[in-house]
Image: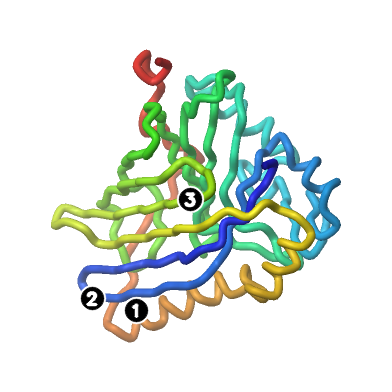
């Protein structure tokens, strides 16, 4: 498939200093960046860099350039990867022109179609964006970690570590992130979904099944923040790194095997 919709549930569990849970039904778009124009041509309700019911704008990702796949390949080569194979991006699409992506995940392959790296592109509601680039080791279940370098939740300090666990995209997809500090687990965030090939019928069904979903994403973030504030949580200071990408682990000879 050039593109798929993953229907599922995104859930968060905050463990400390107050207990807080949330769960929302959503869908995510997985697309081969080299095949975006083919998806555009095949679907009436999906466009690349043009307004539509569903759309994908290159400038919503990466460094905001007009050609996301070229930028991503150059970035991968700059950090020691081949940048020569498929790049699959998991994200929310624009719906009626609007999107906010708290997390976008790039599955980056080499010429032999081996997964060589995963890029986690994180955004906050203050307009900041940062990426964590981590070499993959060939395992079917991807386990990676990164020291926190970018302020996301205004209620969590910077001294924390992310632990990523995700499956390779297939009929099903699962993604889990655990955030720890020196005292142990703070927050668990998960998404699990089932794939459906992108088609006009699938897009129209998703539009009515999840009406104005991307608007609801940003509304839910602020709604849950208000509930945390009411529970006694207070804002914590944060930073925005000057480098747009943190290279967490570079490729090694073992990764290439």
- Spot the residue most to the bottom: 230
Q: Count residues near mark 3 (Cα–Cα under 10 Å), then give few for <14, some for 14-19, many for 20+.
A: some
Q: Where does the image place residue 169, in percent across and percent down from the top left?
A: 52, 43
CA–CA distance between discs 3 and 2? 30 Å
In the image, is 9 to the left or to the right of 238?
A: right
Tell me the residue at 62%/71% (across/down).
Answer: 213
Q: Identify the residue under disc 2.
A: 18
Callout 1–callout 2 Cβ contact below 8 Å: yes
Q: Count residues near mark 2 (Cα–Cα under 10 Å), then give few for <14, some for 14-19, many for 20+.
A: few
Marked residue nearer the N-terminal end (3 or 1): 3
Tell me the residue at 61%/58% (across/down).
Answer: 92
Q: Where does the image place residue 196, in percent across and percent down from the top left?
A: 63, 55
Tell me the residue at 40%/45% (across/down).
Answer: 166
Front residue of this view, candidates 5 and 133: 5
* Quadrant of image for the C terminus: top left
- Spot the residue most to the left: 183
Label 2 residue SS: loop
Label 1 residue SS: helix
Marked residue nearer the N-terminal end (3 or 2): 2
Tell me the residue at 52%/54% (across/down).
Answer: 128
Rendered image: mark on residue 173 = 3
Identify whether 134 is placed above or below 24.
Answer: above
Q: Where does the image place residue 243, in percent across and percent down from the top left?
A: 48, 38
In the image, is 29 to the left or to the right of 37?
A: left
Q: Identify the residue under disc 1.
A: 228
Label 3 residue SS: strand
Q: Nearer the viewer, mark 3 or mark 2?
A: 3
């Amino acid at each position: 498939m050039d593109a798929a919709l993953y229907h599922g549930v995104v859930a968060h569990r905050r463990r400390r200093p107050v207990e807080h849970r949330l769960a929302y039904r959503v869908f995510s778009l997985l697309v081969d960046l080299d095949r975006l124009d083919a998806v555009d041509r095949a679907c009436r309700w999906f466009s690349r860099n043009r307004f539509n019911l569903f759309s994908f704008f290159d400038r919503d990702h990466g460094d905001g350039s007009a050609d996301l796949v070229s930028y991503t390949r150059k970035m991968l080569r700059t950090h020691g990867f081949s940048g020569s194979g498929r790049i699959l991006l998991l994200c929310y699409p624009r719906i009626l022109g609007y999107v906010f992506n708290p997390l976008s995940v790039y599955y980056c392959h080499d010429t032999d179609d081996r997964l060589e790296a995963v890029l986690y592109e994180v955004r906050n509601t203050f307009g900041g964006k940062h990426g964590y680039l981590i070499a993959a080791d060939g395992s079917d279940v991807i386990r990676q970690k990164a020291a926190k370098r970018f302020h996301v939740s205004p209620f969590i300090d910077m001294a924390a570590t992310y632990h990523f666990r995700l499956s390779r995209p297939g009929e099903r997809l699962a993604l889990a992130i655990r955030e720890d500090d020196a005292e142990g687990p703070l927050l668990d965030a998960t998404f699990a979904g089932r794939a459906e090939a992108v088609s006009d019928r699938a897009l129209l069904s998703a539009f009515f099944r999840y009406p104005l979903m991307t608007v609801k994403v940003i509304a839910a973030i602020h709604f849950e923040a208000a509930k945390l504030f009411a529970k006694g949580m207070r804002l914590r200071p944060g930073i925005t790194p000057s480098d747009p990408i943190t290279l967490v682990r570079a490729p090694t000879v073992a990764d290439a095997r």
